[in-house]
Image (cartoon, rainbow, N blue to C red):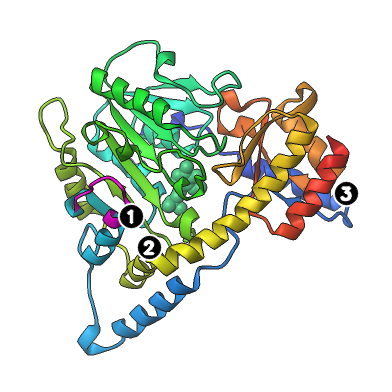
Amino acid sequence: MNIKTNSNFKNIKETYLFSEIASRVRRYQEENPGAKLIRLGIGDVTLPLPAVAVEAMVRAANEMGRQETFRGYPPESGHEFLKKAIADHYTADIRLSEIFISDGAKSDIGNLVDILGNNKIIIPDPVYPVYVDSNLMSGNKISYISGSSENGFLPMPDQIREDGAAVIYLCSPNNPTGAAYDRAQLTKWVEYALKTGSLIIYDSAYEAFITGDLPHSIYEIEGARECAIEVCSFSKFAGFTGTRCGWTIVPEDLKADDGTSLNKMWFRRQATKFNGVSYPVQCAAEAVLSGEGIRQCMRNIAYYQENADMIAAVLDEKGIYYTGGKDSPYIWLKCPGGMDSWTFFDHLLGKAQIVGTPGEGFGEAGEGYFRLTAFGTHENTKEACSRLRELL
Ligand code: PLP
């Protein structure tokens, strides 16, 4: 062939993290066939869908099988019934025209680069890798702001070296650190964005895990409508990782330097390249936002939170520094004894048969840290905690 490819792909690092974990685990199992491994590395939910979601999907599937109730293509930005349910879920005023239903937060985060030019990009480190890779694919230059024990893994605007308009990615509660911004911190971010003419892309995929008085949405902060897009998901709230549904809010107040409306551009982008989420899935998403739906989802989240509490209790006992575990399914701990992330991975696997995720895989600032997750069963988490108590 004589075609050219997108040469920016050459700038993307190989995603060796999960394949490297799998190969080290495989090797260990071959050498220790009787070992009972506990996996605390997964970022995927494990509890089944809430009953309301299943019932809604079955009902909708039956509607699709009858002439009178059959539906073809859904509206590009989603059915109004689901947009209404999402708008009601927010404490801030969100117009239906500002809500765009999608097949999940990952697609929207990855696709938002389509409507943005070559801006300065600011991304916290460590963080969910999709922000970095989608910008590298577009040829954008990235400046990183590091998380550390000094800032509680919550980078702030005073760490930005050159002021000026930028696209800033924030994730709260954060994957992998579990750290979540409070109102005062998010206010500083919104003030910074307004002052510099920057855009914040705010990923709130884990907002349902927030327990304290922390903002669930950036629109709880005054001025955010003029500087922020928010991306959210049913994946972690309702266990939709395999069902696929999320949404993005693009306020009508967002205007680029030449006055272009980002809302109109995103509508155009989605209408051109995306044909909507299936009717049964949108019905299931509406159902989980009902009173009973929220109760069922929060029961599952409480189950994961009990796992997080168990792990956090061991780290508290041992005096090991960590973030997360309170408003998040992730616990981000400092590797004991100054071990680097992969040495601690091998140590934990070899000595306690526990599989976690080396922090270095989420960015340079993750070196020396380690992610454990609360998505396991109570039984396995309890067993892992007693092994951790012995080992640490
Ligand atoms: N945002 C963050 C921070 C995540 O950790 C994940 C998935 O793990 C996603 C977005 C993806 O969500 P979705 O399943 O809606 O694509």
Q: Residues within 10 Å of mark 1 (few under 14, many from 20)?
A: few
Task: Name the chief secondary structure element in magenta.
Answer: loop
Q: Which residues are magenta?
A: 87-95
Residue identified by numbered label 3: 31
Q: Is residue 91 magenta?
A: yes
Left or right position of 297 against 312: left
User: What residue do we see at 76% from left, 29% from top?
Assistant: 319
Report, in whole angstroms, how far the alpha carbon at label 1 lies from the one at label 3: 51 Å
Q: Secondary structure at mark 2?
A: loop
Front residue (pair 66, 114): 66
**Residue 240: % across, % down:** 47, 61
Q: Quadrant of the N terminus?
A: top left
Q: Is residue 302 magenta?
A: no
Q: Earlier in the sequence, mark 3 or mark 2?
A: 3
**Circle on res. 89:** 1
Q: Amino acid at mark 3?
A: Glu
Confirm or deny contact between disc 1 and disc 2 (CB under 8 A): yes
Report, in whole angstroms, how far the alpha carbon at label 1 lies from the one at label 2: 7 Å
User: What residue do we see at 38% from left, 31% from top?
Assistant: 169
Front residue (pair 173, 277): 173
Residue identified by numbered label 2: 289
Report, in whole angstroms, how far the alpha carbon at label 3 lies from the one at label 2: 48 Å
